[in-house]
Image: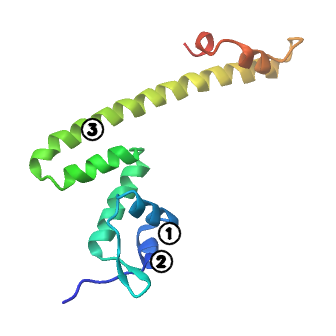
């Protein structure tokens, strides 16, 4: 029984990926260049699975370079699991660092907005805060 064949539009519908994104992923090698049926690209079940993997990785914030590394590791078998874990652990560390930065920004903005609400200052606390050294405020 032949494997199912999908057009790029059908692949887009099945995965939720934009057609231009699919073409981009092909150009940069995250997806293999599709076979052609006439002038139309033709995709199979493995393409659906691979694109799903790429999309989930990107949604989790992995860079294109990291996704490429994960795809290479996925093809490598069981021994690659430790390397994939290490890559994911490094990414998790980066995500946690960004969350900490966002929390510091949130505190600074909340304090500044509260100062604006009081309205006792002659100037604008928000604009004055933005003019200060960011390291003084965010640390």
Residue at point 27% right, 46% down?
A: 69
The residue indicated by pointer 2 is 9
Residue 69 - label = none
Gap between marks 3 and 2 measured at Cα: 32 Å
Residue at point 47% right, 25% down?
A: 100
Residue 110, by quadrant, is top right
Secondary element at tag 2: helix
Gap between marks 1 and 3 measured at Cα: 29 Å
Residue 132, percent from left and from top: 70, 12
Mark 2 Cα within 10 Å, few/some/many (few <14, many 20+)?
few
Mark 1 Cα within 10 Å, few/some/many (few <14, many 20+)?
some
Q: Is residue 93 above or below residue 66?
A: above
- Judging depth in this view, the residue of 128 and 5 nearest the camera is 5
Left or right placement of residue 50 versus residue 9 in this view: left
Quadrant of the rendering where the C terminus is positioned: top right
Residue 123, percent from left and from top: 87, 14
Q: Is residue 39 above or below residue 17?
A: below
The residue indicated by pointer 1 is 19
Residue 111, percent from left and from top: 68, 19
* Tag 1–tag 2 contact (CB < 8 Å): yes
Secondary element at tag 3: helix
Left or right placement of residue 1 versus residue 43 in this view: left
Residue at point 28% right, 34% down?
A: 89
Left or right placement of residue 21 versus residue 37 in this view: right
Mark 3 Cα within 10 Å, few/some/many (few <14, many 20+)?
some
* Tag 1–tag 3 contact (CB < 8 Å): no
- Judging depth in this view, the residue of 82 and 76 nearest the camera is 76
Q: How many marks?
A: 3
Which of marks 3 and 1 precedes in the sequence? 1
The residue indicated by pointer 3 is 87
């Amino acid at each position: 029984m032949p494997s199912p064949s999908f057009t790029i539009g059908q692949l887009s519908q099945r995965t939720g990926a934009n057609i231009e994104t699919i073409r981009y992923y092909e150009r940069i090698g995250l997806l293999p260049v599709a076979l052609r049926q006439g002038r139309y690209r033709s995709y199979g079940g493995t393409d659906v699975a691979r694109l799903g993997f790429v999309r989930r990785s990107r949604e989790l914030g992995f860079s294109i370079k990291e996704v490429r590394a994960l795809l290479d590791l996925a093809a490598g078998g069981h021994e690659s699991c430790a390397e994939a874990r290490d890559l994911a652990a490094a990414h998790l560390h980066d995500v946690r660092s960004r969350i900490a930065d966002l929390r510091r920004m949130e505190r600074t903005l909340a304090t500044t907005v509260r100062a604006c609400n009081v309205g006792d200052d002659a100037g604008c606390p928000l604009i004055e805060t933005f003019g200060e050294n960011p390291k003084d405020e965010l640390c």
